[in-house]
Image (cartoon, rainbow, N blue to C red):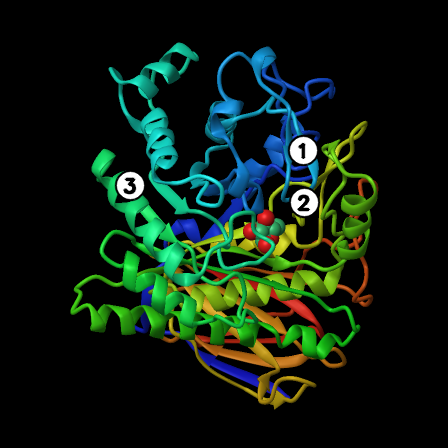
Amino acid sequence: KYAKMVVDKDFRIAEIDKRMYGSFIEHLGRAVYEGIYQPDHPSADKDGFRKDVMELVKELNVPIIRYPGGNFVSNYYWEDGVGPVDERPKRLELAWRSLETNEVGLNEFAKWSKLVGSDMMMAVNLGTRGVGDACNLLEYCNHEAGTKYSDLRIKHGYKEPHKIKTWCLGNEMDGPWQVGSKTPAEYGRIAYEAAKAMKLIDPDIELVSCGSSSTSMKTFPEWEATTLEHTYEHVDYVSLHQYFGNADGDTPNFLAKSMETEHFIKTVISTCDYVKAKKRGKKNINLSFDEWNVWYHSHQADDNTMKREPWQKAPALLEDIYNFEDALVVGLMLITFMKHADRVKMACLAQLVNVIAPIMTQVDGPAWKQTIYYPYLHASKYGRGIALQPVLYSTKHDTKEYTDVFDVDSVAVYNEEAEEVTIFAVNRDLADSIEFTCDIRSFEGYGLIEHIVLTNDDLLASNSAIKQAVAPVTVNDTFLDNGIIKTNLRKASWNVIRLG
Ligand code: AHR
């Protein structure tokens, strides 16, 4: 078994939009309360934000964070979360059958985002609300002053507008579980009207039209075709959501699932281009992969909590404890996004803290890193620059659902400014290390900086607040000679080979 790759400065896919390494915080479970905000925690700052969490988020260098949902947004009344905290109402939160206290709302979240160095991607409620409310929210957030809602923001202590650039027109509106779900025609109409009005208020914003909530929806990709025919003129992106699981314990098949991500991206690009052609349009609709991750470990426990113990404040929901193989899948999905940097402009790892998250918190203890933290960290840190077209050949295998699965998947990113090239590679083979050679002929004078590896003999190993069983190491058996990198990619491993 072997894999061979050629990377060349001139084989450019596109400059990676830094928002490819975005994430997501929903008012769900312990993401906000006991996650980013816990005033009685020893690390809390004066506003109640946990500094230990902020440190880990800052290390990830998350460029944009989607907020406040997710399914939550489809029955969210943003006005409940602004103004004096002691006057804010408690509400029944229907998506996750919890109690929303509204102690944190959009102003607090904006403050927190600034502290961690992230922009906000704001979602509007197109489930139980509509065009007028979306406009009011935008006026509150982005208009300078002198109008009902901008003055209200100022009265609430936020003189400067939040200037939120990226806005999602609802969430997963195709899903029957969504409060206020819509048919493609219904969604297309309301999203078109909301988009048109919102761009009248602030022409500088960018809008994301809801795509299908997964490829398994019966309406995929007809949903994209129909809704974009309505919204094409006023929107800039369409959303994609995808979660993978390994409930039947078939790891080779699980590791091949990123081929479905590839297929999903290609299908949505084709659909966007079909609508563009039909409209005789000039602009491309790009892709916002604004929910993606592994998600399955917590399903059963969550069903029980929502059914049997509803209306709790910050219940422990969607608290997947990730294992080592999950980290490989996250790495493979990141590689797939990079390969499509020409059209995938934004992506949000769902989510960021406690809820299907790379960062977990203990209520009386520290914040800690899950296994998936590491590929996400490496991609965000070293995956900035120009994605290079990998001319990759790898030996292949078949799995239960997929054929011709490459044993090794890989991509390279060229950071012109830093004069560095980073090769990301996953060896999917569970038994053997694989000889990997990479011709970097056009990068004359470059040397090896380091080869970071995430691997573990136990595919099910996971981390906890007291033990980082899965953590990256630097290895010394990689060589660069005459423009050719030679190494053995360890069995089941995530690799980051840095050159400069
Ligand atoms: O991220 C968890 C949930 O997954 C989101 O609320 C929803 O949009 C999706 O179904």
Q: CA distance from mark 2 to mark 1?
A: 9 Å
- Residue 20 position (above or below residue 246): above
Residue shown at the point (74%, 61%) measured from the top left = 324
| Residue denoted by label 1 | 35
Please give the label number shown on residue 355: 2
Q: Is mark 1 within 8 Å of ligand 1?
A: no
| Residue denoted by label 3 | 205
Residue 235: x %, y % from top left: 29, 53
Would residue 379 be found to the left or right of residue 53 on screen?
A: left
Which numbered disc flags the more N-terminal residue, 2 or 1?
1
- Closer-to-camera residue (81/265): 81
Snapshot quadrant of residue 329: bottom right
Residue shown at the point (70%, 72%) measured from the top left = 492
Snapshot quadrant of residue 20: bottom left
Q: What amino acid is labelled 1 in the image? A: Gly
Q: What amino acid is labelled 3 in the image? A: Ile
- Asked whether disc 2 touches disc 1, contact meaning CB atoms under 8 Å apart, the reply is yes
Callout 1: 10 Å neighbours few (<14), some, many (20+)? Answer: many
Which numbered disc flags the more N-terminal residue, 3 or 2?
3
